[in-house]
């Protein structure tokens, strides 16, 4: 039972039923009791995700450009990905970093945890910053999924801030991490 900010209003989850199962998420119909009144909400269920701001040995930020279907355009982002069932966020971060970039973390730190859009989505995002180095091709074991076309490029912090300022980066997690890093709120 949850008491809300409105005095006297009590919300209680009555039931949740899955109504759709997609490859990367599920959708649930959630029924709440609000002081005796039935309220229905739809929730997109996510297994949890990570993102990582990769900093190369020469101090540059490693970014990705890839097509994103919901935005229907190419977006510039930091590496990110879905957690596998039972997988720790750190393990997901290391896996996604190698899969998407061919780099490995020499050192890393968890910076934040947060809901991405809690009005309709239960996705909980784990934010990391990592000092990275390129994996020798002979040692690389993980590669992008066959449907992922990722273009990598490196930028200075100043160049990254300019991409944000010019609205060339419009991905919220990427904007947040670039700004936090440039303001020295996060680091290694």
Image (cartoon, rainbow, N blue to C red):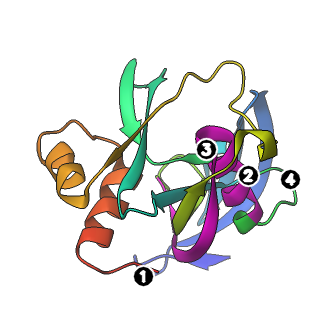
Q: Nearer the viewer, mark 1 or mark 3?
A: 3
Q: Nearer the viewer, mark 4 or mark 2?
A: 2
Q: Residue at x 46, y 52 (%)?
A: 117
Identify the disc placed on residue 7. Answer: 1
Is 134 one of the magenta-colored residues?
A: no
According to the picture, the residue beneath numbered tag 4 turns out to be 85
Q: Residue at x 49, y 20 (%)?
A: 69
Q: Residue at x 20, y 47 (%)?
A: 164
Q: Are marks 3 and 2 in contact (CB under 8 Å)?
A: no
Q: Earlier in the sequence, mark 4 or mark 1?
A: 1
- x and y percent of residue 73 in the render? 37, 20
Q: Nearer the viewer, residue 17 or 166?
A: 166
| Cα gap from disc 2 to disc 1, whole angstroms | 46 Å
| Cα gap from disc 1 to disc 3, whole angstroms | 21 Å
Q: Is residue 152 above or below residue 92?
A: above
- x and y percent of residue 20 in the render? 75, 28
Identify the disc placed on residue 95. Answer: 2
| Cα gap from disc 4 to disc 1, whole angstroms | 38 Å
According to the picture, the residue beneath numbered tag 3 turns out to be 40
Report whether 3 appears left or right of 182: right
Label 1 secondary element? loop
Outermost residue toward the right?
A: 86
Q: Residues within 10 Å of mark 2 (few under 14, many from 20)?
A: many
- x and y percent of residue 39 in the render? 59, 49
Q: Residue at x 58, y 73 (%)?
A: 108
Q: Nearer the viewer, mark 4 or mark 3?
A: 4
Q: Is residue 188 above or below residue 164?
A: below
| Cα gap from disc 4 to disc 3, whole angstroms | 27 Å
Q: Earlier in the sequence, mark 2 or mark 1?
A: 1
Q: Is residue 78 above or below residue 92?
A: above
Q: Nearer the viewer, residue 9 or 140?
A: 140
């Amino acid at each position: 039972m949850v008491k809300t900010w409105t005095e006297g209003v009590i919300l209680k989850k009555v039931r949740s039923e899955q109504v759709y199962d997609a490859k990367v998420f599920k959708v649930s119909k959630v029924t709440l009791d609000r002081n005796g009144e039935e309220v229905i909400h739809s929730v997109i269920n996510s297994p949890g995700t990570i993102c990582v701001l990769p900093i190369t040995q020469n101090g540059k930020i490693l970014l990705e450009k890839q097509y994103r279907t919901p935005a229907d355009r190419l977006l510039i982002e930091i590496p990110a990905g879905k957690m596998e069932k039972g997988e720790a966020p750190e393990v997901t971060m290391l896996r996604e970093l190698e899969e998407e970039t061919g780099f490995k973390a020499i050192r890393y730190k968890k910076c934040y945890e947060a809901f991405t859009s809690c009005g309709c989505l239960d996705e909980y995002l784990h934010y990391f910053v990592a000092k990275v180095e390129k994996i020798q091709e002979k040692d690389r074991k993980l590669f992008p999924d066959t449907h992922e076309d990722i273009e990598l490029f490196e930028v200075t912090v100043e160049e990254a801030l300019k991409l944000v300022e010019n609205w060339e980066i419009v991905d919220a997690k990427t904007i947040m991490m670039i700004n936090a890093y440039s303001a020295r709120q996060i680091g290694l």
